[in-house]
Image (cartoon, rainbow, N blue to C red):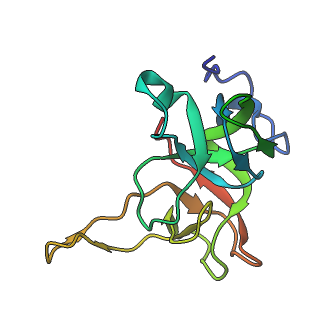
Amino acid sequence: MATSTLIQFLDAGQAGDTSHRRQVETFFAAGAIAAGDWVSLDVSQTGADKALYIVQTPGTAGDGRVVGVALDTATGTAAAPVQIRTVVAGYGGTAAVATGVAVGATLMASAVAGRAGAAQYVASGGGATALPDVIGTALTLAAANLAEVFVHKRF
């Protein structure tokens, strides 16, 4: 079910989901996802279920299926998928980001599953380089492969 994006009130120091600071959607997971992992649409599903199920982002730099950051840890199976809340826009809290990524850096899916890295041009194989598929912005310096992030709306 879609979450409301109405501004209720402005009050500093409140939780991340107060007053449209973030938008959270619930998906199904048929595999293991840890809280803070960047997640992608599960294209192994059939038909419209591709937009209902998510997986940890694959280890493909610049992957374009990323929808947000998992708020929960969940392990489901194909026979028994579990629900998982995911930040699809706004303040994402602490997420998996490659160590050393600077404050304010734009983020893209990295070559490590579930983790974002600093956005960079990606070789397209045809001699040209493609623009990075930006998924968010680092709000703190990434240390121990973690940083606070702002998720760019893509879902």
Tally of marks:
0
Residue 15 vertical placement versus 108 (above, below): above
Identified at 51% across, 69% down, the residue is 110
Image quadrant where one finds the N terminus: top right
Q: Nearer the viewer, residue 15 or 99?
A: 99
Identified at 44% across, 47% down, the residue is 65
Question: Left or right: where does residue 131 sit relative to residue 49?
Answer: left
In the figure, residue 23 lies in which quadrant?
top right
Q: Is residue 37 visible?
A: yes
Q: x%, y% of residue 67?
A: 52, 43
Question: Left or right: where does residue 145 sit relative to residue 48?
Answer: right
Residue 2 vertical placement versus 51 (above, below): above
Q: Residue furthest bottom?
A: 100
Identified at 69% across, 75% down, the residue is 141
Question: Left or right: where does residue 145 sit relative to residue 122?
Answer: right
Q: x%, y% of residue 92?
A: 68, 49
Q: Nearer the viewer, residue 53 or 85?
A: 53
Q: Nearer the viewer, residue 43 or 62?
A: 43
Q: Is residue 72 visible?
A: no
Q: x%, y% of residue 63?
A: 42, 58
Identified at 58% across, 70% down, the residue is 112
Residue 107 vertical placement versus 48 (above, below): below
